[in-house]
Image (tube, rainbow, N blue to C red):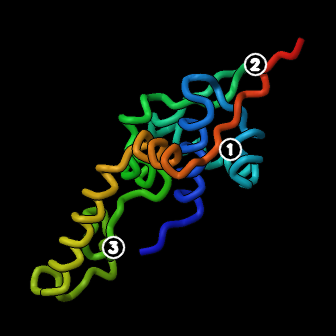
Amino acid sequence: MRLSTKSRYGLRALFDIAYNSGTLPAQIQDISRRQQISPRYLEQIFQSLKKAGILKSKRGPQGGYMLAKKPEEITLKQIIQATEGDLVLVECNTTKRKKTGECTFDGACVTQIIWQEASTLLNGYFDEITLKTLCDRGVAMGVTREQDHRFVYYI
């Protein structure tokens, strides 16, 4: 299994929002600059995340994107499912597999059990990691936070 850039960039962008903006709306150009991801691609990714109820947006000059839930309530599994779909290692383990091309060994395949167990373990791991976990790791690693320049005033 290989995760696409959509889920990897989506995770980085959500971490950026949680880490740098907190409850304030984050502007797409700021996320794009910090994470070096195209703003147009971020907009596409954010549509999937909004549809899944992970992100919400606010229009206007002080608008932007913000988390729809607290960082400790958003798991990596939810993010990956919003951007990729079901998280399974092989097609024969998905409940939504196509009627055509079904495996002739379905139900009689020893490896099918192994892939199902591995998928379950991976899903469990991703379900334990939250955006808050990533933020805590960012602090421990010394990742610098950027102040929102919209609210910095000089006298």
Q: Earlier in the sequence, mark 3 or mark 1?
A: 1
- For residue 53, above or below residue 78: above
Disc number at residue 134? Answer: none
For the residues bearing labels 3 and 2, Cβ distance under 8 angstroms: no
Q: CA distance from mark 3 to mark 2?
A: 45 Å
Residue tagged 1: 43
Residue tagged 2: 151
Q: Position of residue 120 (x, y in %)?
A: 22, 64
Q: Horizontally, is 148 left or right of 19 in the view? A: right
- For mark 2, give the secondary structure: helix
Q: CA distance from mark 3 to mark 1?
A: 28 Å
Q: Position of residue 35 (x, y in %)?
A: 69, 51
- Image-quadrant location for residue 110: bottom left
Q: Amino acid at mark 1?
A: Glu
Residue tagged 3: 89
- For residue 29, above or below residue 87: above
Depth check, front residue: 42 or 11? 11
Depth check, front residue: 87 or 134? 134
Depth check, front residue: 104 or 79? 79
Q: Residue at x 45, y 34 (%)?
A: 53
Q: Within 10 angstroms of label 1, few (less than 14), some, or many (20 or more) residues?
A: few
Q: Amino acid at mark 2?
A: Phe
- For mark 1, give the secondary structure: helix
Q: Position of residue 94 (x, y in %)?
A: 28, 67
